[in-house]
Amino acid sequence: MARIMVADDSDAIRMVLKDILTIGQHELVAEATNGIEAIEEYKKSKPDILLLDVAMPKKDGIAVLKEIISSEQSAKIIMITASDNQKTMKECLDSGASAYILKPFEFQDVLNVISNVFDSG
């Protein structure tokens, strides 16, 4: 069971992700609705994995990713995006993201990605 934080500005997406985490028997340790909040909550909760939306208000997900990775290189961050733009996905992975999930997603796909990232050490 992983301790997971969810950062997404959409209430509906956060609710779906919470349901998926419950089904997968993971623990939701924090939530954030914008990039600045995501960084603050990440530092407080120290999750095993951060599920982070690319398109966030106040500070976008890529900026949040880079900031967290710069101070904690071992952070496990899974980016979530509605865009299948390869340049954006490459930037996320090059900046230290462990994986990414495309919206709309299937609950089993989310659990598989979480498992793969969590089990990778």
Image (cartoon, helix red, strand yellow):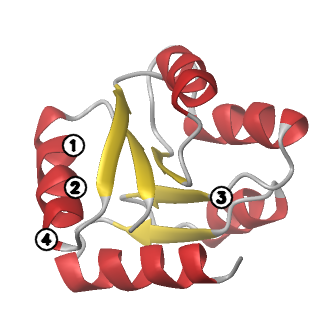
Mark 2, residue position: 17
Quadrant of the image for the N terminus?
Answer: bottom left
| Spatial CA span between label 1 and label 4 | 14 Å
The amino acid type found where label 4 is placed reads Ile
Say few, some or many: other residues with alpha carbon within 10 Å of mark 4 (under 14 / 14 to 19 / 20 or more): few
Q: Which of marks 4 and 3 is nearer the N terminus?
A: 4
Packing grade of label 3 (10 A; few <14, some 14-19, many >=20) is many
**CB-based contact (under 8 Å), mark 4 and mark 2:** no
Circle 1 is placed at which residue position? 14
The amino acid pointed to by label 2 is Leu
Viewer-nearest residue: 6 or 59: 6
Frontmost of labels 1 and 3 is: 3
Left or right placement of residue 26 versus residue 112 in this view: left
Dot 4 lies on which element? helix
Residue 105 horizontal side relative to residue 8, left or right: left
**Mark 2–mark 1 contact, CB under 8 Å?**
yes
Q: Which mark is residue 76?
A: 3
CA–CA distance between discs 2 and 1? Answer: 5 Å
Q: What residue type is labelled 3?
A: Lys
Q: What element carries label 1?
A: helix
Residue 31 screen position, x and y as percent: 34, 31
Residue 103 shows up from this direction: yes
Kindly identify the residue that appears in the image at 48 percent across and 46 percent down: 52
Lower sequence index among marks 1 and 3 = 1
According to the picture, the residue beneath numbered tag 4 turns out to be: 23
- Quarter of the picture containing the C terminus is bottom right
Residue 88: percent from left, percent from top: 64, 59
